[in-house]
Structure formats: structure tokens, C-alpha cells
Image (tube, rainbow, N blue to C red):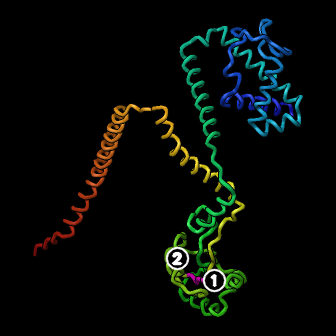
Amino acid sequence: MSLKKIKNFSLSLLVGLIALPGCSFLNKKDKEESKTIVSGEVLVSADGKPILTEQEFNEFLDQAAEADPQAKMMLSMMPEAIREQALEVKKRAATISEWAKREGVRETQEYKNKHKLIMQSVQESLDNEAFMKKHKVEVADQDAKTFYEENKTKDPRFMISQAGTKTFGVEFASKEKADEYLEKIKNKISSIEKDAESKKLKTRDFGIINTESYAPKAIKDAILKAKVPSVQVIKEDNKFWVVAALSKENAKYHAFDDIKDGIKRMLEQQKMEKMMEEELPKYEQKFNIKVNEGYVKDLKEKKEAKEKELKEQFEASQKAQEAPKNKNNKNVKELAQAQPTSAAA
């Protein structure tokens, strides 16, 4: 790995770690304000005051490895190179932090407001993580398998292709040519593809035709009613097709093993939602959690009023667009009903 790639990795590693809820350094007081005795080798300092110790640096890397499998792999493969670049990133962060403190940035109201929101978000995220861990939901492979078997034919996400009729067509410019070819091929329908190819005729593989297909309407309608196998001439626009209904194809589905993980995630999400619906009301009652019903009622009324206003605006717009059309239709009708004037003798 090049030095540039290592550096980029270290940068992303730091940014990713900072974004993690509950990173230890987010909750620490500045070293200047802390009475904690520094132990271990100091790696970064400012004006002789420790900013980062070896122990803190190791904790930082441990958190990165725990949070990101790629970081863990890179640290095991190239520990010295990653540590070197990570330390450079931490030094840069320390320099910016010192600038922010000395410039009084942290004392501004804007900074304090943002800091408060971020810390609140971090705390809520950690609380949620702990709650989910305490009320963990799991889905066994057998549960996922049962869901798959019960819903395979109902859920379109499990389907690769629908059942239908495998269809192939040969195009002709005239009905006479199409009829002529039909006579030649009707007793050897299964060989229509090879025969048309050998004669260099214009063909189209319509694939599997069913009620959901996007095949040309005339061809689709005819094939849905056709016996299998069979062949017929169908007119579509100004063309004539010799269309063969070759075989009935069953629906094809994804194998369970290919989508097992996705099914488990979906079922876990459903179980989690159910758990929340069951458990949260218990805690709301236990902790006497209340919501300002008057505020909620006011929001609901305003929402309904806005929806009504938008609906009225839409209806008025529709009427305005229809008015010219109605007027034109009336004029056309009046002209059509008008009697022609007799010419003077």
C-alpha cells in the first residue's frame, strides 16, 4: 500500500471513529482542566502540557479496530505504518483543538449550541444501543426458512421470473409471406428459431409472456389465449408476425441460501418493531412519560388545514386546465351541428 493510501485510510479511520457514538475522547475534559495524573509516555504535547499519551493512543486504535473490520485488518497487516499515520492525524486534530481553545471558539454561543446537540445525539445513540442490547431480538435460520417457504410464491422479492409462455416470433412485411412461412413451420414449431436464423429472417425473442409482460398488445393477448405448443399469424401495427408459443415455463425463485441473510434482517426488523410496541408503553407508564396533548392537537389541526388548502388549490388548478378544453369541445360540437348555408340562386 502506498503512503498516500495509508494516509487516506488513517484520515478516514479517524473521521469514522470521531463519528462513533460514545467515543471516549468526546466526553473527556481538556487536559488543562483535568486533575488526572498523566501516566505513560506522552506522544503529543502543547507548551509542554500532555495532550495525548501512549495509553490514550492505543485506546483510540482499539476503538477503531473494534468499530471497523477493515481498520482491524490494516492494523494487523501494517501496524507501524498505520500507527505512524494515525499519530500524524491525531497531532493535526490536537493542533486544531488547541487553536480552537486559544482563539475562544469554544466559548462562542454557536459552538456551545452545536456541542450540546452533538453530545445529546451521542447520548441518545448510546442509550438506544444499550436498550436494543438489553431487549435483543434474534431470528433463527429455521424461522427464516419457514417464512421463505410460506411466502415464496406470494412475495415478488423472492421471484426471479414469473410463470408464462416462452414465445418467439418471425416478422414479415405482408400477410401473404407470413402465411407462407406459417405453412412451412407449423409441423416443426420447436425448430422455428433455428429455421428462421438459417434463412436470415427478422426475428424477435419475446421471452416469457404473461399478464405482467410488456410485449406488444396484439401478440400478448393472442399468446395468453394460445395452446402450447402452437403457432399463428398475428398482425401488430403494419407488420405480420408468425408467433410460436413454444412451451409453458414455471415461475423461478431465488434459492433460500442466496437470500437468507436478507430475510433474517427483515424479520429482525419486524421483531424489533414489535418489541418496541410492546416494551415502550410499559416504560412510559413506569416512568410516567407524558406528552403535551394540546401541542399535538394543535399540530394535527394545522396539518389537516394545510392538507385541505393544498387539495383545494389542486382542484382549482384542475378546473382551470379543464375550462379551455370544455370551451373548445363546445365550439366543435356547435360547428358540427350547424346547418350549411344555401347558396343564392
The C terminus lies in quadrant: bottom left
- Left or right: 74 with respect to 321? right
Q: Nearer the viewer, residue 54 or 309?
A: 54
> Where is residue 166 drawn, in percent x and y?
62, 78
Q: Verify whether residue 244 appears in magenta.
A: yes
> Where is residue 158 drawn, in percent x and y?
62, 63
> Where is residue 208 drawn, in percent x and y?
61, 74
The N terminus lies in quadrant: top right
Numbered tag placed on residue 246 in the rendering? 1
Give the residue type that dot 2 points to.
Lys
Report helix, strand or loop for mark 1: strand
Report helix, strand or loop for mark 2: helix
Q: Earlier in the sequence, mark 1 or mark 2?
A: 2
Q: Nearer the viewer, residue 88 or 335?
A: 88
Residue at x 54%, y 17% (from the top left corner): 110
Tell me how far mark 1 sits from mark 2, CA to CA: 14 Å
Q: Dot 2 surroundings within 10 Å: few (below 14), some, or many (20 or more)?
A: many
Numbered tag placed on residue 220 in the rendering? 2
Residue at x 81%, y 22% (from the top left corner): 87
Choose top left, top right, bottom left or bottom right for residue 85.
Answer: top right
> Is the residue 111 above or below the residue 286 in the image?
above
Q: Nearer the viewer, residue 293 or 340?
A: 293
Extreme residue toward the front, this view: 286
Any part of residue 242 in sight: yes
Any part of residue 237 in sight: no
Q: What stretch of residues is rendered in magenta?
A: 241-246
Residue at x 50%, y 40% (from the top left corner): 282
